[in-house]
Image: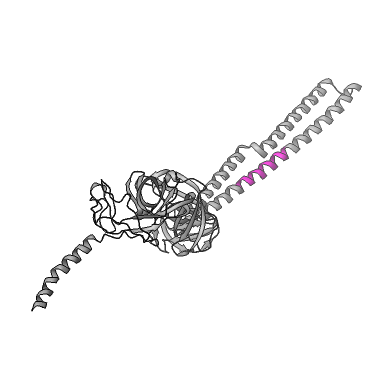
Amino acid sequence: MKAKFLLWALVPGVVVALGIFFLLRGQAVMGVRVRRGDLTHTVVASGRVAPAARSTLGFTVSGRVKEVRAKEGDHVRASDVLVVLEDREAAAAVEQGRAAVAQAQARRDALRTISGRVAEADQAQAKAAVDLAEQRLRRLEALVATGATSQDELDQARANAEQARARLRASQSQVAGSRAQGAELRAAEAALAQARAALELAEARLEQTRVRAPADGTVLSRAVEPGDVVSPGQPLLGFAWDGPFHLVMEPDEKTLRLLSPGQEAVVSAEAWPGRTFKARITEILPAVDVKKGTVEVRLDLVDPKDYLRPDMTVSIELTVARKSGALVVPVAALDGVRGEKAKVWVVKEGRAMPRRSSWASWGRTGQRSLMGFQRARWSFWSRKRAGPLGCVCGYGSFGHDPGRGLAGHPIPSGGAISVPPDPCRRLRRGWRHHLSLSADFRVAGHAYIEDAR
């Protein structure tokens, strides 16, 4: 009976003792050993593979599709016919135009031949008349000298010779006119030109019933089948021109100040995540997309890969700055971040000391670069923040007391320091709790301590 009474009397004592133990034990705070390493500032964004040039092919006239000669993935040559519309009317108009040209040309040639021959015959006849008149004139001049004929007959012969010469000159002019400037011939030439223009128009309309490849390239997409009725401007084929691929990315406009042509990037395709290749910025477009708040950046491939395809999604990590010999700590060690200022707790000469420094964002994992430290062995941090009076409370908590807090407390060789359960309260004599530090803890993202004084 007495033993049972003692047992029930000990139970509340044990419960109270356990409660005090867990209350005063303190909370573990994670830490990491500070190390030196190289610092690389990167900007990461998704992008896509783009061909040298891209075209959307379609018709400029409406009609019914007669034939489709290309499918997705086909490599074609420049001017190859890819799609054909019903073209009976257009083809008939071309044949009619060719017949009209042939008819006009025949008439022109006939006028050139007939009028030219007539004029040449008249010229020959006029020349013969001139020769005959000059011979008679010379004979009469001899007879007048001997008195065998009268002067009046000589004068008549001279007049006849002059008339023959005039007719010769006229026939020569007629020959020249028939060859180059005859009215009928000019009309025939105009009719021939009109027929040729009509033929060119008919051929152009026939060509509008065909879609041709604008260059050597590959058909990316096809949205047309035989029998479809299409309208002007309707996209039918997606076409990629042959040439080297390039990359297009659209990072947030906030990163614009960090980007410049010539910066290198490491790229990986989502289809082949284990493979990487290099690229380099060649162009940053001046306009910002007002809806998305992004800017378009174009990159050339340094080492093109044969497995790349147009519009393939890639991850692009741009290196915008490099620094070496930086002191590295996890990003979670930053405390009290205000603008470009932050505080980090470090172990210095066996004591936990807060240090305030400026910082900058580095890398896709939230890395930080801190300035103001020359060297450090340990840094530690908490999981939660934003406690009262600037304290950091919760699991893995640490902070500072307006009077004393953690600052200046010794850290034993075992890796623990004495802190109160609530770091925001003043230390009380006799409380002994510990803060555990782990040198092997890892997080995604690091802080880098640099430029120390």
Q: Main secondary structure of the magenta part?
A: helix
Taking the magenta stretch, the answer to whether it contains residue 307 is no
Taking the magenta stretch, the answer to whether it contains residue 107 is yes
Judged from this view, the residue extending furthest toward the bottom is 1
Count of all numbered marks drawn on residues in the image: 0
* Residue 235 at x, y percent in the picture: 41, 55
Is 367 left, or right, of 190 in this rendering? left
Judged from this view, the residue extending furthest toward the right is 146
Q: Is residue 394 above or below residue 339?
A: below
The figure's colour scheme reads one colour
At a point 90% along the width and 21% down the height, the residue shown is: 145
Judged from this view, the residue extending furthest toward the left is 1
- Asked whether residue 57 appears in the rendered view, the answer is no
- Asked whether residue 438 appears in the rendered view, the answer is yes
Q: Nearer the viewer, residue 228 or 106?
A: 228
Q: Nearer the viewer, residue 34 or 120?
A: 34
Specify the quadrant of the image occupied by residue 35: bottom left
At a point 80% along the width and 26% down the height, the residue shown is: 157
Q: Nearer the viewer, residue 45 or 11?
A: 11
* Residue 117 at x, y percent in the picture: 70, 43
Is 21 left, or right, of 211 in this rendering? left
Position of the C terminus by quadrant: top left
At a point 23% along the width and 49% down the height, the residue shown is: 388
Q: Nearer the viewer, residue 267 or 209?
A: 267
Position of the N terminus by quadrant: bottom left
* Residue 85 at x, y percent in the picture: 45, 59
* Residue 96 at x, y percent in the picture: 52, 53
Magenta region = 106-122
Specify the quadrant of the image occupied by residue 445: bottom left
